[in-house]
């Protein structure tokens, strides 16, 4: 598993993102490349931008019990898995803007470092340790970059 808190690993993610083109096609799934970039940005928006509603207590409990381990473990995501409603991106997005935003979020996360995320609360999953944060960020990025062949 790559480490989003290490510059070298972040540089690898950014290199892969920069290999994407506006007309890149997915190897699986329904998202366009601009939608995929916007989709990846949602994870970071939930951490940094306070623009997504916190799930209610019942939904948080369900997510913790049924989804948390799949999200924060090192086990890669399967192709064509379902996503939460707030991660569904409808319509076209500005490819360059979403790409730039994603790179900025990756750099910000790396610069803040592992200690910033130790015990930090996730909007949906409660408190996570830095390893769980890393796994969530890294495997989500890897999954979708692999989806587009980079």
Image: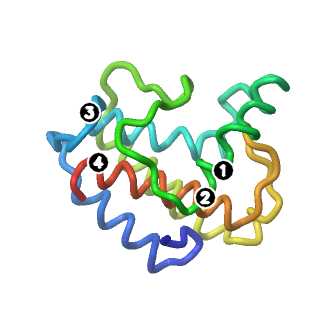
Residue with the mark numbered 2: 73
Q: Mark 2 and mark 4: span between their CA atoms?
A: 19 Å
Element class at badge 4: helix
Label disc, if present, on residue 32 of the rendered structure: 3
Element class at badge 3: loop
Percent coordinates x, y for residue 5 in the rendering:
59, 72
Q: Quadrant of the C terminus?
A: bottom left
Crowd tier of the residue under label 1, counting other residues whose Cα lies within 10 Å: few below 14, some 14–19, many 20 or above: some
- Asked if labels 1 and 2 touch by Cβ distance under 8 angstroms, the answer is yes
Q: Mark 4 and mark 1: span between their CA atoms?
A: 22 Å
Residue with the mark numbered 1: 69
Q: In this rendered view, identify the residue nearer to me: 149 or 64.
A: 64
Left or right of residue 19, residue 31 in this image:
right
Q: Nearer the viewer, mark 3 or mark 4?
A: 4
Q: Which of marks 1 and 3 precedes in the sequence?
A: 3
Q: What coloring was used for the rendering?
A: rainbow
Q: In this rendered view, identify the residue nearer to me: 67 or 40.
A: 67
Q: Which of marks 4 and 3 precedes in the sequence?
A: 3
Residue with the mark numbered 4: 147
């Amino acid at each position: 598993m790559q480490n989003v808190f290490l510059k070298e690993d972040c540089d690898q993610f950014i290199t892969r993102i920069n290999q994407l083109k506006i007309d890149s096609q997915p190897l699986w799934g329904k998202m366009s490349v601009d939608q995929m970039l916007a989709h990846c940005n949602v994870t970071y928006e939930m951490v940094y931008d306070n623009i997504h509603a916190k799930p209610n207590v019942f939904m948080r409990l369900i997510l913790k019990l049924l989804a948390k381990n799949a999200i924060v473990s090192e086990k890669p995501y399967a192709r064509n898995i379902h996503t939460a409603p707030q991660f569904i991106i409808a319509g076209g997005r500005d490819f360059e803007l979403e790409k730039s935003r994603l790179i900025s979020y990756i750099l910000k996360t790396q610069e803040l470092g592992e200690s910033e995320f130790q015990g930090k609360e996730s909007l949906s999953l409660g408190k996570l340790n830095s390893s769980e944060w890393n796994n969530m960020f890294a495997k989500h990025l890897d999954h979708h970059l692999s989806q587009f062949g980079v």
